Amino acid sequence: MSTWPIVGHEWAVNLLAQSVASGRLSHAYLFTGPAQVGKATLARAFAQAILCERGSGAACASGEPCRTCQRIAQGRYPDLQIIAAEKNTIQIEQVRVLQADAALSPLEGRFKIFIIREIERATPPAANALLKTLEEPPPHVILLLTSHRRDLVLPTVLSRCQVVGLRPAPLEQVRAALEARGATPEQAELLARLSGGRAGWALDALAHPEVVQTRGRHIDELLALTTDGASSRLGYAESLSRHADTIEETLGQWATWWRDVLLIQRGNPDGVINLDRRVQLTQQALLFRPEQVEGALADLMQTLHRIKANVNARLALDVLALRLPKPAVA
Ligand SMILES: [Zn+2]
């Protein structure tokens, strides 16, 4: 099947609405893009567009939504099931439950829709079982898969899906979405910048303040490590390596920090991401030499690259931790 060009959320909604309106629906779609860019949100909006009682080709947007759109938003529509990893993997039992359910007719609408999040986490037996459904789906079944690691999705699965690639949204769009959900202008500005255009992350952070607190803790840990000796650096690397899920997020946040320090050193403070830490950023800009900061940023990028290439994470993090710069100016 085909791959659409990588598009923003609004374009994706338009493209999908056209396929609903023209009745040219595929039986399987794969939404790809960076983690928390809004893939699951898009999948749910697409499910609403397909099942909406008003049948306009799009989900109810303005005014009172229809009962179907409403229940899908609340996660209690009987013909929409969401399957996600349990203990880090999607297991064959979950696919079997899906298949038993898929064999039955929809209870309400014309379709039964299954959203499978992070399909790359399917174990090989689960992926193979799912392949059967992708090859010969019951006519009333639509599968919406998401993945931020398209490179890990089986080619046999990819080839049976309409692939929809999502790119990060412009910051003003994220900001507007946050304000529409009740964020203050300052809060919206900070979260939009921290999100890097990943609307899913921003909305999650708005609903769960601990997301921003965790990011603050990761930055504090980085700052503490720069003045720590080798043994506590290695201890930190060891404990981070045991939390595979948070490595990328943590290193990504560290990268925004060094990037901000560099912006201030270069006299360009307007572009900083960590807006709530401007005072501390200014202090840090005086403590490190620009070439140290550039080196730290390069090390981070290389570590992220290595970890994505499945190099031993512990080893990569040890090297990174030991190479973190020490303040040059006492
Ligand atoms: Zn509707």
Image: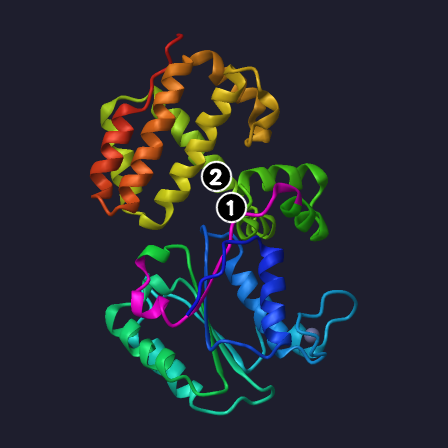
Q: Image quarter for residue 194?
A: top right
Judge whether residue 74 can be spotted in this image: no
Q: Tell which residue pokes out farthest to the top in this image.
A: 330
- SS for callout 1: helix
Q: Residues within 10 Å of mark 1 (few under 14, many from 20)?
A: some
x then y, percent, for residue 156? 30, 70
Residue 50 badge: none
As measured in the structure, the alpha-carbon distance from the residue carrying label 2 to the one carrying label 1 is: 6 Å
Residue 139: x and y in percent read: 47, 87
Residue 62 higher or lower than 8, as above or below: below
Give x and y (percent) for residue 272.
Answer: 56, 28
Residue in the image at 52% along x and 15% along y: 266
Q: Quadrant of residue 231?
A: top left
Quadrant containing the N terminus in the rendered view: bottom left
Q: Pointer 2 and pointer 1: residues touching (CB < 8 Å)?
A: yes
Position of residue 5 in the picture relative to residue 10 (left or right): left
Q: Residue at x 60, y 86 (%)?
A: 109
Q: Residue at 36% of width from left, 81% of height from top?
A: 133
Q: Any magenta on residue 161?
A: yes
State yes or no: Cβ of the residue under disc 2 lies below 8 Å from any atom of ligand 1: no
Q: Residue at x 37, y 57 (%)?
A: 150
Q: Does residue 214 show up magenta in the picture?
A: no
Return the residue found at the far right.
63
User: To which residue does mark 1 refer?
Assistant: 211
Magenta segment: 152-172
Q: Which amino acid type is marked by label 1?
A: Val
Of the four image quadrants, the one with ligand 1 is bottom right
| Camera-side residue of 47 and 167 | 167
**Res 215 label:** 2
